[in-house]
Image (cartoon, rainbow, N blue to C red):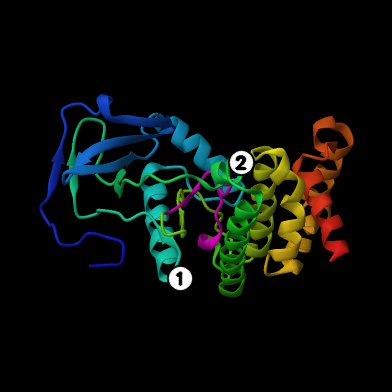
Amino acid sequence: MRSGEDGKNNGEKLAFEDLTPFLLLKNGNYLYKVPFRGGWAVLKVYYGSRTPWQHFKKSFENICAGQTSYFPKTRRRIELECLALWRRHGFRVFKTFEQVSVDTPNCPPGGYTLFEYVEAPKLDACLRDAARPLEERKALYRRFLAEWGRRHALAIAEREPRLVHENGDGKHVLIMPDGSFLWFDFEMIYRSRRDVALHVSHEIVQYIWYLNRNTVPDFQACLLAETAAHYPGPERLRDAYRYFFRHPNLAHRWARGLERRFKEKARSPDSKYGVARRLMDELSKT
């Protein structure tokens, strides 16, 4: 049995005449909360709402941008690869039940994964919970920064793009009862090993920008200072600033310069550019 997978139940099957009553979320993928072994599991059907033409069109756009294919089987394969890799490095992710087959309409073989069902609060929800003392939320964020920074260091050292959380934003991290972090949603990653440091920079700004927008004033006021003081790798934070303002690709740098010049939204202190600049200001104080 591979870590995180259930390999003891060959031949086990789930059958449903209709998944509609179990629909949990539809966001391109279909997620269903289905009965399983006396409890629940989450059945993810990859891009079940998209047509083959949409898969092809989006895949072409992604490949031009250096990203993975949009086709369901590719997305499933990438997600399973990421789950296995993150587990090997000691990061907590959802368990999967790959040996259990599912027989139901609109659930094609090779186009779905059965995950464990977990109920736990998300990182962003915990950080904006004003009922929690601010010092408690700071302590939680500092623990997050330590694990976050460790993963970034591994990704860069191993030149491993699958260790970058492309959909990272604070709502894709659960806080488990024992205080550990459970990370999820890995189906879309960048492919280039050469550019891993750039992808890490993007993830850093993406997370901080999202948390700045989706927490509460008392935590927003200390977010950047806490990040600058406790993230284990200040040079990577400086690289995140450089990624947005001095991108090594001249075409990217030119396009971003135009965006900042002509888009009022891009000049906002709460834009990604603004967050990167404010983070750099905090780093200059340390």
Circles 1 and 2 in contact, beta carbons < 8 Å: no
Q: How many numbered discs sit on the rendered protein?
A: 2
Q: Main secondary structure of the magenta part?
A: loop
**Disc ID at residue 89:** 1
Look at the picture and state if 278 lies above or below 24: below
Residue in view at x 29 percent, y 36 percent: 33
Work out whether residue 74 or residue 30 is closer to the camera in this orientation and state it. Answer: 30
Badge 2 is on which residue? 128
- Report x, y in % for residue 173: 50, 50
Q: Amino acid at mark 1?
A: His
> Is residue 66 visible to us here?
yes
**Disc ID at residue 269:** none
> Is residue 247 visible to us here?
no
Crowdedness of circle 1 by 10 Å Cα count: few (<14), some, many (20+)? few
Q: Is residue 168 magenta?
A: yes
- Report x, y in % for residue 285: 87, 63
SS label for mark 1: loop
